[in-house]
Image (cartoon, grey):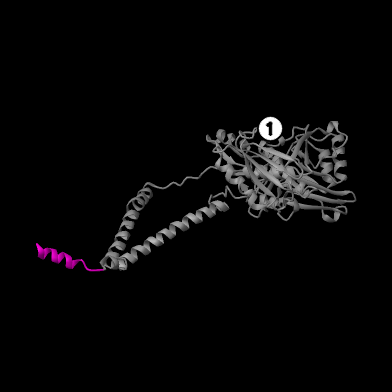
């Protein structure tokens, strides 16, 4: 018994516990623990900094939460103090709307975003607007002038019902940037543009989508019958004659001519009609143009299998078309040709510029009812101008006239031509419209074999690889 006790006593070497704190195993463990604590601390600090500075990256394919260059240009030109009041109760924020609104004060020091709870402050909105405000609505206020604009959440996030009737599914759109940027321009602008659309000749009506675009451009659109007018109203920024199916009356022709001769701005779109239109022809002739009657068929730049729906070349160098990019295109249907007088025959100060042209392979069919797409007697070979911009410098201003020889056009052509014709307001603000962004997500499809392969890789091979790597590290450390 005494021998065992002696052996135990001998095994208790002095300083053994102290040496354990200086062993390689302890140092390695302590080092790992310190590194772990440091990493965790860094993660916490970085997260706090990012949350405080609101730093984020938009990884969405369509840059849903990134303001476009057009918006950034508008915001950088802001000189007044603008407040964007985001009206929402705590916990009721719509994520898509909130994310976009947060981007505005990052671009300009003159813009700030303030969240206001309409429940806590039920009478706050009445200081600025008469509209009934609900969660996720926005009120944009120019603090310098007191001008205010209300934006409904239903306009910022909405379902396109038209797509439901055409495809069976309703597409959702995000239009926060378009609506809020438009509201900022609205409160800043002191010179509102006004468009008058001529009626009384079975003209083409402006589509709902184009009307929404013009509204975002802060342009007021109003119909006008020139039969009852002795002149075009003085507040007219742009006069549009959109595909008349019959000729103008003599009095209407006189009103339009007087307006243009005094430096007016107009868009004339004579679509194909079998009837003669001498009064419309007289206006065109005065500005060095005439219509080549018939329908253009395109041998090269046509849309899908429709030879009479063409994709003309856009002259982006023309001022009126400068908003188009090199990769943009437009589609027009059943277009006629536009013949121009030689420059030597034009009066001084009048200049014509082609803005839309067809290819050399195009053909103008004099008889559109003919089913023969080959050249027949009387048909004309291309190329043709389907859009021409006329500009005349006068003592009292500048006349601007855009002629497009069809009324079957896409909204993007109308939007850009109208914007180019309107130009900047007297206060320097441009007519800018930001398109809504689709929230539809594309799905990835793969074959059954590919699905099985990726399942094996992700479910079996990757986990096994991680286990083997972990075992190798453990085994290496154990040997040390």
In the rendered image, residue 278, in percent from the top left (x then y), is placed at: 83, 38
Which of 395/82 is in front? 82
Quadrant placement of the N terminus? bottom left
The answer to whether residue 37 is visible is yes
In percent of the image, x 67 and y 33: which residue is there?
A: 123
In the rendered image, residue 300, in percent from the top left (x then y), is placed at: 62, 51
Residue at mark 1: 131
Where, by quadrant of the figure, is residue 309 drawn?
Answer: top right
Where, by quadrant of the figure, is residue 8 drawn?
Answer: bottom left
Q: Residue furthest right?
A: 395
Which of 461/370 is in front? 461
Where, by quadrant of the figure, is residue 226 drawn?
Answer: top right
In the rendered image, residue 13, in percent from the top left (x then y), is placed at: 22, 68
Q: Tell me the magenta residue range.
A: 1-14
The answer to whether residue 376 is visible is no
Residue 13 falls inside the magenta stretch: yes
Answer above or below: position of 408 versus 19.
Answer: above
Q: Residues within 10 Å of mark 1 (few under 14, many from 20)?
A: few
In percent of the image, x 34 and y 63: which residue is there?
A: 29
In percent of the image, x 50 and y 56: which residue is there?
A: 45
| Relative to 372, 440 lies left or right | left
Residue 195 falls inside the magenta stretch: no
Answer above or below: position of 257 versus 77.
Answer: above
Element carrying mark 1 = loop
In the rendered image, residue 206, in percent from the top left (x then y), is placed at: 71, 37
Quadrant placement of the C terminus? bottom left
Which of 196/38 is in front? 38
| Relative to 385, 328 lies left or right | left
In percent of the image, x 84 and y 31: which residue is there?
A: 227
Magenta span dominant secondary structure: helix
């Amino acid at each position: 018994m005494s021998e065992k006790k002696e052996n135990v006593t001998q095994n208790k070497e002095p300083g053994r516990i102290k040496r354990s704190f200086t062993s390689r195993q302890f140092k390695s463990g302590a080092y790992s623990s310190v590194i772990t604590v440091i990493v965790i601390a860094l993660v916490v600090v970085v997260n706090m900094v990012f949350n405080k500075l609101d730093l984020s990256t938009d990884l969405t394919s369509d840059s849903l939460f990134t303001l476009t260059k057009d918006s950034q240009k508008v915001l950088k030109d802001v000189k007044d103090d603008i407040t964007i009041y985001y009206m929402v109760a705590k916990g009721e924020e719509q994520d898509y709307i909130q994310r976009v609104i947060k981007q505005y004060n990052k671009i300009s020091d003159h813009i700030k975003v303030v969240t206001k709870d309409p429940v806590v402050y039920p009478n706050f909105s009445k200081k600025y607007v008469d509209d009934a405000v609900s969660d996720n609505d926005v009120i944009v206020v120019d603090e310098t002038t007191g001008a205010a604009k209300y934006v409904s959440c239903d306009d910022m996030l909405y379902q396109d019902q038209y797509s439901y009737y055409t495809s069976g599914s309703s597409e959702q759109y995000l239009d926060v940037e378009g609506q809020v940027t438009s509201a900022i321009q609205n409160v800043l602008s002191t010179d509102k543009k006004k468009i008058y659309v001529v009626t009384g000749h079975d003209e083409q009506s402006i589509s709902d989508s184009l009307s929404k675009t013009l509204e975002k451009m802060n342009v007021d659109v109003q119909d006008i019958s020139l039969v009852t007018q002795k002149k075009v109203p003085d507040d007219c920024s742009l006069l549009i004659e959109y595909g008349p199916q019959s000729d103008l009356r003599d009095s209407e022709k006189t009103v339009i001519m007087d307006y243009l001769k005094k430096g007016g701005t107009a868009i004339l779109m004579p679509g194909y009609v079998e009837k003669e239109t001498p009064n419309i022809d007289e206006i065109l002739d005065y500005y060095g143009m005439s219509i080549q009657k018939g329908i253009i068929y395109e041998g090269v730049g046509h849309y899908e299998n429709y030879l009479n729906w063409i994709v003309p070349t856009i002259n982006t160098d023309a001022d009126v078309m400068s908003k188009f990019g090199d990769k943009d295109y437009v589609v027009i249907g059943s277009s006629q040709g536009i013949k121009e007088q030689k420059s030597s025959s034009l009066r001084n100060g009048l200049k014509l510029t082609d803005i839309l042209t067809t290819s050399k392979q195009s053909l103008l069919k004099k008889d559109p009812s003919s089913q023969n797409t080959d050249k027949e007697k009387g048909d004309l070979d291309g190329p043709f101008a389907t859009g021409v911009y006329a500009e005349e410098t006068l003592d009292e201003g500048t006349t601007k006239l855009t002629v497009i020889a069809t009324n079957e056009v896409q909204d993007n052509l109308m939007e850009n031509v109208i914007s180019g014709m309107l130009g900047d307001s007297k206060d320097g603000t441009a007519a800018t419209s930001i398109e809504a962004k689709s929230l539809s997500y594309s799905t990835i499809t793969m074959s059954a074999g590919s699905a099985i392969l990726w399942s094996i890789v992700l479910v079996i091979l990757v986990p096994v690889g991680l286990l083997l790597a972990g075992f190798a590290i453990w085994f290496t450390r154990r040997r040390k």
